[in-house]
Image: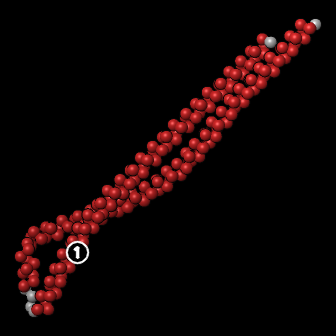
Amino acid sequence: MKKVSRMVLTAAFLLTGIGMTTKAAASSTDDEITAVNQKIEATQSSIDQAQKSISKLQSQQTKDEEEIHSLTVNINARKKHLAQQARSAQENDAGSIIQFITDSKNFSDVIDRIAAVVTMVKANNQTLAEQKNDKLKVVADKANVDSAADKQKQLNNQLNEQMANLAVQKVELKLKRLRKMQLLSKLLKKL
């Protein structure tokens, strides 16, 4: 009888110990799964923020593309205008400007004609400056749009990779928990 009591007590002690160990191991795995789930939620939140950022970026990109198109139209129109002026200047040569001024009837007419020539030269210089600035703005806008799109794409790829890694971790932890449960089941069957 003493032997049977000892065996029952030993078996009970072993079952209790195995149960506690298994519960602790299962609890540890559950904690790990919970931590991975929290990481998944945080990463999903980051992905959601990245999507909002992408939407804003796409909106800005559309605006920049419209501005680039508008600037390109202006650049092409000025280019045609400047080409016409250059042809006209070649046909009339610089002597015609001097002749235009010297054909004045009086001193007041000379002043008016010089002012007209100066105004025309200033307008041409301003047109050339605007042309140069618009071309630089187009290049800068394109570079900004491309850079922002690349950065956002990289961030998106990183977040998607993190999400995939976390999903793999979660599956691995669930398998670990399942194996522990199967091991416990086998141990219990042996007893």
Q: Is residue 73 visible?
A: no
**Residue 70 seen anywhere in this rendered image of the structure:** yes
Name the one closer to the observer, 152 or 111: 152
Residue 160: x and y, percent? 52, 39
Query: In the figure, is residue 101 to the left or right of 121?
Result: left
For this orientation, the residue located farthest to the right is 1
Report the number of discs. Answer: 1
Secondary element under disc 1, as helix, strand or loop, is helix
Q: Label 1 crowding class (10 Å Cα cut-off): few <14, some 14-19, many 20+?
A: few
Most foreground residue, 127 or 184: 184
**Residue at image x 28%, y 60%?**
135
Please name the amino acid that badge 1 sits on. Ala
Left of 72 or right of it: where is 115?
Answer: left
For residue 38, above or below residue 149: above
Please give the name of the residue rendered at 86% of the width and 10% of the height, measured from the top-left corner.
7
Is 124 on the left or on the right of 158, as rendered? left
Residue 139: quarter of image: bottom left
Location of the N terminus (image quadrant): top right
Please give the name of the residue rendered at 14% of the width and 84% of the height, measured from the top-left corner: 113
In this view, 90 is above or below 167: below
Mark 1, residue position = 123
Position above or below: 48 against 36: below
Task: Tell me the quarter of the picture where residue 6 sits.
Answer: top right
Q: How is the image coloured?
A: secondary structure
- Residue at position x 14%, y 92% in the image: 108
Indicate the position of residue 57 as horizontal and vertical percent values: 46, 54
Q: Position of residue 5 (x, y in %)?
A: 90, 11
Q: Is residue 189 left or right of residue 50?
A: right
Relative to 91, residue 148 above or below: above
The quarter of the image holding the C terminus is top right
- Can you give x and y, in whole percent of width and height, for residue 73 in the image? 31, 62
